[in-house]
Image (tube, helix red, strand yellow):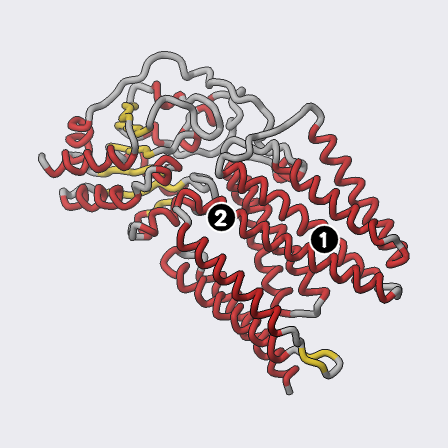
Amino acid sequence: MYSSLLTFSYLIASVTFIVGLKMLSHPATARKGNLVAAVGMTLAVIGTIFLYEKDGESLGNYGWIFAGIAVGTILGTVSAKKVKMTAMPEMVSLFNGMGGACAALISLVEFDHLSYAGTTANPVFLLIVVLGLVIGSISFAGSVIAWGKLNGSIKDFAFPGQHIFNLLVLAVIIGMAGYLIALSPAQPQWFIYGIFGLSILYGLFFVFPIGGADMPVVISLLNSFTGVAAACGGFLYDNKVMLTGGILVGAAGTLLTILMCKAMNRSLANVLIGSFGGGAKATAAAGAQGSYKEITLSDTAVLMSYANKVYIVPGYGLAVAQAQHICHELEKLLESKGVEVNYAIHPVAGRMPGHMNVLLAEADVPYDKLKEMEQANDEFATTDVVLVLGANDVVNPAAKSDPASPIYGMPILDVELSKHIIVNKRSMKPGYAGIENELFFRPKTSMLFGDAKKVLQDLVAEIKSL
Protein backbone atom coordinates (compact mmCIF):
# COMPACT_ATOMS: atom_id res chain seq x y z
CA MET A 1 0.00 0.00 0.00
CA TYR A 2 2.75 2.42 0.97
CA SER A 3 4.57 1.63 -2.25
CA SER A 4 1.55 2.62 -4.33
CA LEU A 5 1.11 5.85 -2.39
CA LEU A 6 4.79 6.70 -2.80
CA THR A 7 4.61 6.07 -6.54
CA PHE A 8 1.50 8.27 -6.77
CA SER A 9 3.21 11.08 -4.81
CA TYR A 10 6.21 10.85 -7.15
CA LEU A 11 3.89 11.05 -10.16
CA ILE A 12 2.21 14.18 -8.83
CA ALA A 13 5.59 15.73 -7.97
CA SER A 14 6.93 14.99 -11.47
CA VAL A 15 3.88 16.65 -13.03
CA THR A 16 4.35 19.74 -10.84
CA PHE A 17 7.99 19.97 -11.97
CA ILE A 18 6.96 19.95 -15.62
CA VAL A 19 4.11 22.43 -15.06
CA GLY A 20 6.35 24.67 -12.94
CA LEU A 21 9.09 24.65 -15.58
CA LYS A 22 6.55 25.59 -18.23
CA MET A 23 5.31 28.48 -16.09
CA LEU A 24 8.89 29.67 -15.58
CA SER A 25 9.12 30.36 -19.31
CA HIS A 26 7.08 33.56 -18.93
CA PRO A 27 7.77 36.35 -16.41
CA ALA A 28 4.08 36.77 -15.58
CA THR A 29 3.79 33.18 -14.32
CA ALA A 30 7.36 32.55 -13.16
CA ARG A 31 6.71 33.17 -9.46
CA LYS A 32 3.72 30.80 -9.43
CA GLY A 33 5.69 28.24 -11.39
CA ASN A 34 8.43 28.30 -8.78
CA LEU A 35 5.87 27.75 -6.02
CA VAL A 36 4.18 24.90 -7.91
CA ALA A 37 7.51 23.09 -8.33
CA ALA A 38 8.35 23.74 -4.65
CA VAL A 39 5.06 22.14 -3.55
CA GLY A 40 5.85 19.12 -5.70
CA MET A 41 9.32 18.80 -4.19
CA THR A 42 7.89 19.06 -0.67
CA LEU A 43 5.41 16.29 -1.47
CA ALA A 44 8.21 14.08 -2.86
CA VAL A 45 10.39 14.62 0.23
CA ILE A 46 7.57 13.90 2.68
CA GLY A 47 6.55 10.83 0.69
CA THR A 48 10.10 9.50 0.69
CA ILE A 49 10.53 10.02 4.43
CA PHE A 50 7.29 8.39 5.55
CA LEU A 51 6.29 5.99 2.76
CA TYR A 52 9.58 4.51 1.52
CA GLU A 53 10.14 0.85 2.40
CA LYS A 54 12.84 -1.65 1.49
CA ASP A 55 12.71 -5.30 2.53
CA GLY A 56 9.79 -4.44 4.81
CA GLU A 57 11.70 -1.74 6.69
CA SER A 58 11.01 1.99 6.68
CA LEU A 59 13.61 4.65 6.18
CA GLY A 60 14.27 5.35 9.87
CA ASN A 61 16.89 7.80 11.17
CA TYR A 62 14.20 10.46 11.45
CA GLY A 63 16.19 12.49 13.94
CA TRP A 64 19.10 12.93 11.53
CA ILE A 65 16.78 13.50 8.57
CA PHE A 66 14.74 16.26 10.20
CA ALA A 67 17.83 17.82 11.76
CA GLY A 68 19.36 18.10 8.28
CA ILE A 69 16.13 19.51 6.86
CA ALA A 70 15.92 22.06 9.69
CA VAL A 71 19.52 23.23 9.23
CA GLY A 72 19.15 23.46 5.46
CA THR A 73 15.83 25.30 5.70
CA ILE A 74 17.19 27.87 8.14
CA LEU A 75 20.38 28.50 6.16
CA GLY A 76 18.53 28.69 2.85
CA THR A 77 15.80 30.99 4.13
CA VAL A 78 18.19 33.38 5.87
CA SER A 79 20.52 33.49 2.85
CA ALA A 80 17.66 34.17 0.43
CA LYS A 81 16.16 36.86 2.66
CA LYS A 82 19.41 38.71 3.21
CA VAL A 83 20.95 38.48 -0.27
CA LYS A 84 21.15 41.69 -2.27
CA MET A 85 20.05 41.69 -5.88
CA THR A 86 23.65 42.33 -6.98
CA ALA A 87 24.74 39.21 -5.10
CA MET A 88 22.00 37.00 -6.55
CA PRO A 89 24.23 35.47 -9.27
CA GLU A 90 26.86 34.27 -6.80
CA MET A 91 24.20 32.86 -4.48
CA VAL A 92 22.65 30.92 -7.36
CA SER A 93 26.10 29.63 -8.30
CA LEU A 94 26.89 28.58 -4.73
CA PHE A 95 23.55 26.81 -4.23
CA ASN A 96 24.02 25.04 -7.54
CA GLY A 97 27.43 23.87 -6.33
CA MET A 98 25.83 22.39 -3.23
CA GLY A 99 23.59 20.29 -5.47
CA GLY A 100 26.62 19.00 -7.35
CA ALA A 101 28.37 18.15 -4.08
CA CYS A 102 25.30 16.24 -2.90
CA ALA A 103 25.23 14.15 -6.09
CA ALA A 104 28.96 13.40 -5.78
CA LEU A 105 28.56 12.30 -2.16
CA ILE A 106 25.71 9.97 -3.15
CA SER A 107 28.04 8.26 -5.64
CA LEU A 108 30.80 7.91 -3.04
CA VAL A 109 28.37 6.37 -0.53
CA GLU A 110 26.99 3.91 -3.07
CA PHE A 111 30.48 2.82 -4.12
CA ASP A 112 31.37 2.29 -0.47
CA HIS A 113 28.31 0.03 -0.14
CA LEU A 114 29.50 -2.03 -3.10
CA SER A 115 33.03 -2.29 -1.74
CA TYR A 116 31.93 -3.39 1.72
CA ALA A 117 29.58 -5.98 0.23
CA GLY A 118 32.39 -7.29 -1.98
CA THR A 119 29.96 -8.16 -4.78
CA THR A 120 30.38 -7.57 -8.49
CA ALA A 121 28.19 -4.67 -9.51
CA ASN A 122 26.21 -4.33 -12.69
CA PRO A 123 28.53 -2.38 -15.07
CA VAL A 124 25.68 0.02 -15.91
CA PHE A 125 25.07 0.69 -12.22
CA LEU A 126 28.78 1.30 -11.65
CA LEU A 127 28.93 3.57 -14.71
CA ILE A 128 26.14 5.71 -13.25
CA VAL A 129 27.99 5.86 -9.92
CA VAL A 130 31.13 7.15 -11.65
CA LEU A 131 29.21 9.60 -13.86
CA GLY A 132 27.41 11.08 -10.86
CA LEU A 133 30.71 11.42 -9.01
CA VAL A 134 32.62 13.05 -11.87
CA ILE A 135 29.88 15.41 -13.08
CA GLY A 136 28.79 16.35 -9.56
CA SER A 137 32.37 17.05 -8.46
CA ILE A 138 33.08 19.21 -11.51
CA SER A 139 29.84 21.13 -10.93
CA PHE A 140 30.68 21.66 -7.26
CA ALA A 141 34.27 22.85 -7.78
CA GLY A 142 33.39 24.97 -10.80
CA SER A 143 30.43 26.60 -9.05
CA VAL A 144 32.58 27.53 -6.04
CA ILE A 145 35.12 29.20 -8.33
CA ALA A 146 32.31 30.97 -10.21
CA TRP A 147 30.93 32.15 -6.87
CA GLY A 148 34.35 33.54 -5.94
CA LYS A 149 34.79 35.24 -9.30
CA LEU A 150 31.38 36.88 -9.12
CA ASN A 151 31.94 38.31 -5.64
CA GLY A 152 35.45 39.44 -6.54
CA SER A 153 37.40 37.20 -4.14
CA ILE A 154 38.88 35.06 -6.95
CA LYS A 155 40.60 36.55 -9.98
CA ASP A 156 40.94 35.07 -13.46
CA PHE A 157 43.82 32.63 -13.59
CA ALA A 158 45.44 30.99 -16.60
CA PHE A 159 48.83 29.65 -17.63
CA PRO A 160 50.35 28.62 -20.98
CA GLY A 161 49.04 25.25 -22.08
CA GLN A 162 46.16 25.24 -19.62
CA HIS A 163 43.74 23.88 -22.20
CA ILE A 164 46.06 20.93 -22.85
CA PHE A 165 46.41 20.40 -19.10
CA ASN A 166 42.62 20.38 -18.73
CA LEU A 167 42.23 17.82 -21.49
CA LEU A 168 44.94 15.61 -20.00
CA VAL A 169 43.25 15.67 -16.59
CA LEU A 170 39.92 14.83 -18.22
CA ALA A 171 41.53 11.97 -20.17
CA VAL A 172 43.05 10.55 -16.96
CA ILE A 173 39.63 10.76 -15.26
CA ILE A 174 37.99 8.87 -18.14
CA GLY A 175 40.77 6.27 -18.16
CA MET A 176 40.55 5.68 -14.41
CA ALA A 177 36.78 5.48 -14.59
CA GLY A 178 36.94 2.85 -17.33
CA TYR A 179 39.50 0.85 -15.36
CA LEU A 180 37.36 1.07 -12.23
CA ILE A 181 34.25 -0.17 -14.03
CA ALA A 182 36.20 -3.06 -15.56
CA LEU A 183 37.52 -4.21 -12.15
CA SER A 184 34.25 -3.47 -10.29
CA PRO A 185 34.63 -3.36 -6.49
CA ALA A 186 37.89 -5.33 -6.60
CA GLN A 187 39.62 -1.97 -7.07
CA PRO A 188 41.21 -0.48 -3.91
CA GLN A 189 39.00 2.04 -2.12
CA TRP A 190 41.41 4.91 -2.72
CA PHE A 191 40.90 4.60 -6.48
CA ILE A 192 37.42 6.13 -6.39
CA TYR A 193 38.77 8.97 -4.26
CA GLY A 194 41.49 9.53 -6.86
CA ILE A 195 38.77 10.05 -9.47
CA PHE A 196 36.96 12.35 -7.04
CA GLY A 197 40.11 14.44 -6.45
CA LEU A 198 40.94 14.75 -10.16
CA SER A 199 37.33 15.74 -10.91
CA ILE A 200 37.58 18.51 -8.32
CA LEU A 201 40.87 19.62 -9.91
CA TYR A 202 39.33 19.67 -13.36
CA GLY A 203 36.34 21.67 -12.10
CA LEU A 204 38.69 24.28 -10.63
CA PHE A 205 40.83 24.71 -13.73
CA PHE A 206 37.81 24.48 -15.99
CA VAL A 207 36.41 27.75 -14.57
CA PHE A 208 39.60 29.54 -13.44
CA PRO A 209 40.44 31.12 -16.85
CA ILE A 210 36.89 32.12 -17.74
CA GLY A 211 36.34 35.85 -17.55
CA GLY A 212 34.94 38.74 -19.48
CA ALA A 213 31.21 38.71 -20.10
CA ASP A 214 31.05 34.92 -20.15
CA MET A 215 30.05 34.02 -16.58
CA PRO A 216 26.28 33.75 -17.32
CA VAL A 217 27.02 30.98 -19.81
CA VAL A 218 29.26 29.16 -17.34
CA ILE A 219 26.63 29.34 -14.58
CA SER A 220 24.05 27.91 -16.99
CA LEU A 221 26.39 25.09 -18.01
CA LEU A 222 27.26 24.20 -14.42
CA ASN A 223 23.56 24.19 -13.60
CA SER A 224 22.97 21.60 -16.32
CA PHE A 225 25.85 19.53 -14.91
CA THR A 226 24.17 19.48 -11.51
CA GLY A 227 20.91 18.37 -13.10
CA VAL A 228 22.60 15.45 -14.87
CA ALA A 229 24.42 14.46 -11.66
CA ALA A 230 21.12 14.53 -9.74
CA ALA A 231 19.52 12.35 -12.42
CA CYS A 232 22.32 9.82 -11.87
CA GLY A 233 21.41 9.76 -8.17
CA GLY A 234 17.78 9.14 -9.10
CA PHE A 235 18.85 6.18 -11.22
CA LEU A 236 20.95 4.73 -8.38
CA TYR A 237 18.07 4.89 -5.90
CA ASP A 238 15.37 4.04 -8.44
CA ASN A 239 13.77 7.33 -7.45
CA LYS A 240 11.54 8.47 -10.29
CA VAL A 241 10.98 12.02 -9.09
CA MET A 242 14.70 12.62 -8.53
CA LEU A 243 15.40 11.22 -11.99
CA THR A 244 12.69 13.38 -13.57
CA GLY A 245 13.82 16.55 -11.80
CA GLY A 246 17.46 15.96 -12.72
CA ILE A 247 16.63 15.34 -16.37
CA LEU A 248 14.48 18.49 -16.54
CA VAL A 249 17.22 20.65 -14.98
CA GLY A 250 19.93 19.07 -17.10
CA ALA A 251 18.00 19.43 -20.34
CA ALA A 252 16.81 22.99 -19.61
CA GLY A 253 20.30 24.05 -18.55
CA THR A 254 21.87 22.54 -21.66
CA LEU A 255 19.39 24.23 -23.98
CA LEU A 256 19.89 27.56 -22.20
CA THR A 257 23.66 27.17 -22.49
CA ILE A 258 23.42 26.54 -26.22
CA LEU A 259 21.13 29.55 -26.69
CA MET A 260 23.45 31.79 -24.67
CA CYS A 261 26.49 30.57 -26.60
CA LYS A 262 24.62 31.55 -29.75
CA ALA A 263 23.85 34.94 -28.26
CA MET A 264 27.56 35.38 -27.47
CA ASN A 265 28.69 33.87 -30.79
CA ARG A 266 30.87 31.38 -28.93
CA SER A 267 31.47 27.66 -29.35
CA LEU A 268 30.12 25.22 -26.78
CA ALA A 269 33.19 23.06 -27.40
CA ASN A 270 35.36 25.93 -26.17
CA VAL A 271 33.29 26.14 -23.00
CA LEU A 272 33.82 22.44 -22.32
CA ILE A 273 37.62 22.72 -22.45
CA GLY A 274 37.69 25.86 -20.34
CA SER A 275 38.71 28.37 -23.00
CA PHE A 276 35.50 30.36 -23.18
CA GLY A 277 36.47 34.01 -23.10
CA GLY A 278 39.25 33.42 -20.65
CA GLY A 279 42.95 33.97 -20.65
CA ALA A 280 43.05 36.47 -23.48
CA LYS A 281 44.28 39.87 -22.55
CA ALA A 282 41.67 42.37 -23.60
CA THR A 283 42.82 45.29 -25.66
CA ALA A 284 41.22 48.59 -26.47
CA ALA A 285 39.03 48.60 -29.53
CA ALA A 286 40.72 50.10 -32.54
CA GLY A 287 37.88 52.55 -33.06
CA ALA A 288 37.88 53.85 -29.51
CA GLN A 289 40.12 56.77 -30.26
CA GLY A 290 39.22 60.41 -29.85
CA SER A 291 37.16 62.35 -27.34
CA TYR A 292 33.76 61.89 -25.79
CA LYS A 293 31.18 64.51 -24.91
CA GLU A 294 29.21 64.90 -21.71
CA ILE A 295 25.59 65.90 -21.27
CA THR A 296 24.01 67.74 -18.34
CA LEU A 297 21.04 66.53 -16.33
CA SER A 298 18.90 69.41 -17.53
CA ASP A 299 19.63 68.65 -21.20
CA THR A 300 18.94 64.98 -20.58
CA ALA A 301 15.63 65.82 -18.92
CA VAL A 302 14.53 67.99 -21.84
CA LEU A 303 15.65 65.46 -24.44
CA MET A 304 13.78 62.58 -22.80
CA SER A 305 10.67 64.58 -21.84
CA TYR A 306 10.00 65.69 -25.41
CA ALA A 307 10.85 62.37 -27.07
CA ASN A 308 8.24 60.12 -28.67
CA LYS A 309 9.98 56.83 -27.91
CA VAL A 310 12.64 56.02 -25.29
CA TYR A 311 14.47 52.77 -24.70
CA ILE A 312 16.28 51.97 -21.45
CA VAL A 313 19.14 49.45 -21.57
CA PRO A 314 19.76 48.05 -18.06
CA GLY A 315 23.14 46.58 -17.11
CA TYR A 316 25.09 45.42 -14.11
CA GLY A 317 25.74 49.03 -13.07
CA LEU A 318 22.00 49.42 -12.50
CA ALA A 319 22.04 46.36 -10.22
CA VAL A 320 25.10 47.58 -8.30
CA ALA A 321 23.43 50.92 -7.62
CA GLN A 322 20.12 49.23 -6.65
CA ALA A 323 18.47 51.72 -8.98
CA GLN A 324 15.69 49.56 -10.44
CA HIS A 325 12.92 51.24 -8.40
CA ILE A 326 13.87 54.81 -9.31
CA CYS A 327 14.29 53.63 -12.91
CA HIS A 328 10.69 52.40 -12.86
CA GLU A 329 9.66 55.77 -11.43
CA LEU A 330 11.43 57.51 -14.33
CA GLU A 331 9.59 55.25 -16.76
CA LYS A 332 6.19 56.11 -15.26
CA LEU A 333 7.01 59.83 -15.17
CA LEU A 334 7.95 59.86 -18.86
CA GLU A 335 4.82 57.91 -19.79
CA SER A 336 2.70 60.48 -17.95
CA LYS A 337 4.14 62.98 -20.44
CA GLY A 338 3.13 60.82 -23.40
CA VAL A 339 6.51 59.18 -24.01
CA GLU A 340 6.60 55.50 -25.00
CA VAL A 341 9.15 53.73 -22.77
CA ASN A 342 10.50 50.19 -23.12
CA TYR A 343 13.49 48.18 -21.86
CA ALA A 344 15.96 46.40 -24.14
CA ILE A 345 17.21 43.15 -22.56
CA HIS A 346 20.34 41.46 -23.86
CA PRO A 347 20.45 37.66 -23.23
CA VAL A 348 23.68 37.87 -21.24
CA ALA A 349 23.31 41.25 -19.54
CA GLY A 350 24.31 41.07 -15.89
CA ARG A 351 26.03 38.16 -14.20
CA MET A 352 23.55 35.32 -14.62
CA PRO A 353 20.84 34.24 -17.09
CA GLY A 354 17.80 36.51 -16.73
CA HIS A 355 19.55 38.83 -14.26
CA MET A 356 18.01 42.00 -15.70
CA ASN A 357 14.54 40.43 -15.91
CA VAL A 358 14.69 39.52 -12.22
CA LEU A 359 16.03 42.95 -11.30
CA LEU A 360 13.23 44.82 -13.08
CA ALA A 361 10.55 42.39 -11.91
CA GLU A 362 11.56 43.29 -8.34
CA ALA A 363 10.60 46.88 -9.15
CA ASP A 364 7.25 45.79 -10.67
CA VAL A 365 8.17 46.88 -14.19
CA PRO A 366 5.40 45.57 -16.53
CA TYR A 367 6.53 42.41 -18.28
CA ASP A 368 5.38 43.57 -21.70
CA LYS A 369 7.88 46.42 -21.53
CA LEU A 370 10.85 44.02 -21.43
CA LYS A 371 11.84 43.60 -25.06
CA GLU A 372 14.24 40.89 -26.17
CA MET A 373 17.30 41.81 -28.21
CA GLU A 374 15.84 40.97 -31.63
CA GLN A 375 12.66 42.96 -31.01
CA ALA A 376 14.52 45.95 -29.57
CA ASN A 377 16.98 46.02 -32.47
CA ASP A 378 14.08 46.28 -34.89
CA GLU A 379 12.82 49.36 -33.04
CA PHE A 380 16.01 51.33 -32.35
CA ALA A 381 15.88 53.07 -35.74
CA THR A 382 12.59 54.71 -34.72
CA THR A 383 13.73 55.49 -31.17
CA ASP A 384 14.50 59.07 -30.15
CA VAL A 385 16.58 58.41 -27.03
CA VAL A 386 18.31 55.32 -25.67
CA LEU A 387 19.40 55.55 -22.02
CA VAL A 388 22.14 53.00 -21.28
CA LEU A 389 22.38 52.35 -17.52
CA GLY A 390 25.54 50.53 -16.54
CA ALA A 391 25.62 48.28 -19.60
CA ASN A 392 28.87 48.16 -21.56
CA ASP A 393 29.87 45.09 -23.55
CA VAL A 394 26.33 44.33 -24.78
CA VAL A 395 26.19 47.68 -26.65
CA ASN A 396 29.81 47.77 -27.86
CA PRO A 397 29.96 48.17 -31.69
CA ALA A 398 33.40 46.51 -31.65
CA ALA A 399 31.52 43.21 -31.60
CA LYS A 400 30.50 43.99 -35.18
CA SER A 401 33.36 46.11 -36.51
CA ASP A 402 36.65 45.00 -34.89
CA PRO A 403 37.86 41.44 -35.69
CA ALA A 404 40.64 41.87 -33.11
CA SER A 405 38.17 42.46 -30.28
CA PRO A 406 37.60 39.61 -27.79
CA ILE A 407 33.84 40.07 -28.22
CA TYR A 408 33.89 40.17 -32.04
CA GLY A 409 30.90 38.35 -33.48
CA MET A 410 28.76 38.65 -30.36
CA PRO A 411 25.24 39.91 -31.19
CA ILE A 412 24.69 43.25 -29.47
CA LEU A 413 21.93 45.77 -28.89
CA ASP A 414 22.15 48.14 -31.88
CA VAL A 415 21.57 51.29 -29.84
CA GLU A 416 23.69 53.31 -32.27
CA LEU A 417 20.76 53.21 -34.73
CA SER A 418 18.72 55.52 -32.51
CA LYS A 419 18.79 59.32 -32.77
CA HIS A 420 20.42 59.99 -29.39
CA ILE A 421 22.34 57.70 -27.01
CA ILE A 422 22.92 58.71 -23.39
CA VAL A 423 25.27 56.46 -21.45
CA ASN A 424 25.32 56.54 -17.66
CA LYS A 425 28.56 55.25 -16.10
CA ARG A 426 30.61 56.04 -13.04
CA SER A 427 33.68 56.63 -15.21
CA MET A 428 35.23 55.74 -18.56
CA LYS A 429 36.63 52.54 -17.05
CA PRO A 430 36.12 49.48 -19.34
CA GLY A 431 33.31 47.03 -18.61
CA TYR A 432 33.41 43.44 -17.41
CA ALA A 433 35.11 42.19 -20.59
CA GLY A 434 37.94 44.65 -19.94
CA ILE A 435 37.80 46.45 -23.30
CA GLU A 436 37.07 50.02 -24.35
CA ASN A 437 33.66 50.75 -25.85
CA GLU A 438 33.87 52.71 -29.07
CA LEU A 439 30.20 53.62 -28.76
CA PHE A 440 31.22 56.22 -26.18
CA PHE A 441 33.16 58.11 -28.82
CA ARG A 442 30.44 58.11 -31.50
CA PRO A 443 28.89 61.48 -32.52
CA LYS A 444 25.38 60.57 -31.33
CA THR A 445 26.56 59.42 -27.89
CA SER A 446 26.68 61.58 -24.76
CA MET A 447 28.08 60.52 -21.39
CA LEU A 448 26.20 61.13 -18.13
CA PHE A 449 28.60 60.28 -15.32
CA GLY A 450 27.65 59.27 -11.79
CA ASP A 451 26.07 56.57 -9.68
CA ALA A 452 23.00 55.24 -11.50
CA LYS A 453 20.64 55.68 -8.54
CA LYS A 454 21.75 59.23 -7.77
CA VAL A 455 21.67 60.24 -11.44
CA LEU A 456 18.18 58.83 -11.93
CA GLN A 457 16.90 60.50 -8.77
CA ASP A 458 18.24 63.86 -9.95
CA LEU A 459 16.88 63.22 -13.45
CA VAL A 460 13.39 62.50 -12.10
CA ALA A 461 13.50 65.70 -10.05
CA GLU A 462 14.67 67.66 -13.10
CA ILE A 463 11.90 66.31 -15.30
CA LYS A 464 9.28 67.12 -12.65
CA SER A 465 10.49 70.71 -12.58
CA LEU A 466 9.99 71.22 -16.33
Tell me the quadrant of the picture where the C terminus can be found. Answer: top left
Q: How many marks?
A: 2
Looking at the rendered structure, the secondary structure element under dot 2 is helix
- Residue found farthest to the left: 466
Mark 1 lies on a secondary structure that is helix
Rendered-image quadrant of the N terminus:
bottom right
Comes first in the chain, label 1 or label 2: 2
Horizontal and vertical percent for residue 280?
58, 24
Q: Is residue 326 above or below residue 42?
A: above
Q: Which residue is mark 2?
A: 91
Q: Which label is found at residue 456?
A: none
Q: Residue at x 61, y 29 (%)?
A: 157
Q: Which image quadrant is residue 266 in?
A: top right
Asked whether the beta carbons under mark 1 and mark 2 sit within 8 Å of each other, the answer is: no
Query: Percent position (x, y) of residue 303?
Result: 18, 30
Residue that protrudes farthest toward the bottom in the picture = 1
Q: Which of the numbered marks, if any, corresponds to residue 133?
A: 1
Q: Residue at x 21, y 37 (%)?
A: 457
Say which of 307 and 301 sits in front.
Answer: 301
The disc labelled 1 sits on which kind of residue? Leu
